[in-house]
Image (cartoon, helix red, strand yellow):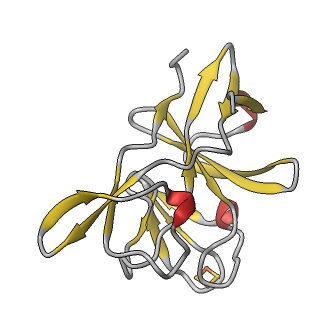
Amino acid sequence: MPLMPLIELDRCPIGRGTFTALGCTELAVFRLADPDRIVVADNACPHASGNLAAGKLSGCIVQCPWHHWEFDLERGVCVNSERVYIRRYPSRVREGVIYVDPSSPIRVTTVQDGNLSRNGDCSALEPHAGEPSRACSSAVRAGDS
Ligand code: FES
């Protein structure tokens, strides 16, 4: 699926999450600072569907406002338990608009017995079911085109 327009960049303050939706898919756009970059992820916290876009953002860590689990947006994993992760999506910024491909969650690598191995698409994995994982960087510089 091609990239689809999601939201204007200037509606996403730096250092915060912004709730948005693409059809029925609720997404959170996190605009990280230093450098200015974007991570697009599912808005629902994998614990109990808390609103991650409203979470406190510190560096690349977002804290869920409901029960305070923390997620590393660069890696896509929960800081409290790397067996839990959030689904992130490829994104681009073009002419002031953030585009996302909701059909292609970012691939992850899993750590098994100390060795990195490729796993399938994130879409094949269910929250709470993954092995400790390390994700490819999903951050897109806000000025990228
Ligand atoms: S719903 Fe996010 S930590 Fe519980």
Where residue 6 sits in the image (x, y, percent)? 76, 35
Where residue 118 sits in the image (x, y, percent)? 29, 55
Q: Is residue 64 above or below residue 106?
A: below
Question: Residue 38: which quarter of the image?
Answer: top right
Left or right? Give the position of 53 relative to 19: left
Count of number-bearing discs = 0
Give me the residue at 48% from left, 32% from top. Answer: 140
Give me the residue at 88% from left, 48% from top. Answer: 23
Q: Is residue 54 above or below residue 64?
A: above
Left or right? Give the position of 46 relative to 26: left
Where residue 40 sits in the image (x, y, percent)? 60, 46
Q: Is residue 36 above or below residue 80?
A: above
Question: Residue 35: which quarter of the image?
Answer: top left
Residue reaching furthest right?
A: 23
Quadrant in which the C terminus appears: top right
Pick the front one: 16 or 121? 121
Where residue 17 sits in the image (x, y, percent)? 64, 52
Question: Residue 48: which quarter of the image?
Answer: bottom right
**Quadrant holding ligand 1?**
bottom right
Left or right? Give the position of 135 relative to 106: left
Pick the front one: 10 or 108? 108
Give me the residue at 69% from left, 33% from top. Answer: 1
Q: Is residue 8 above or below residue 111?
A: above
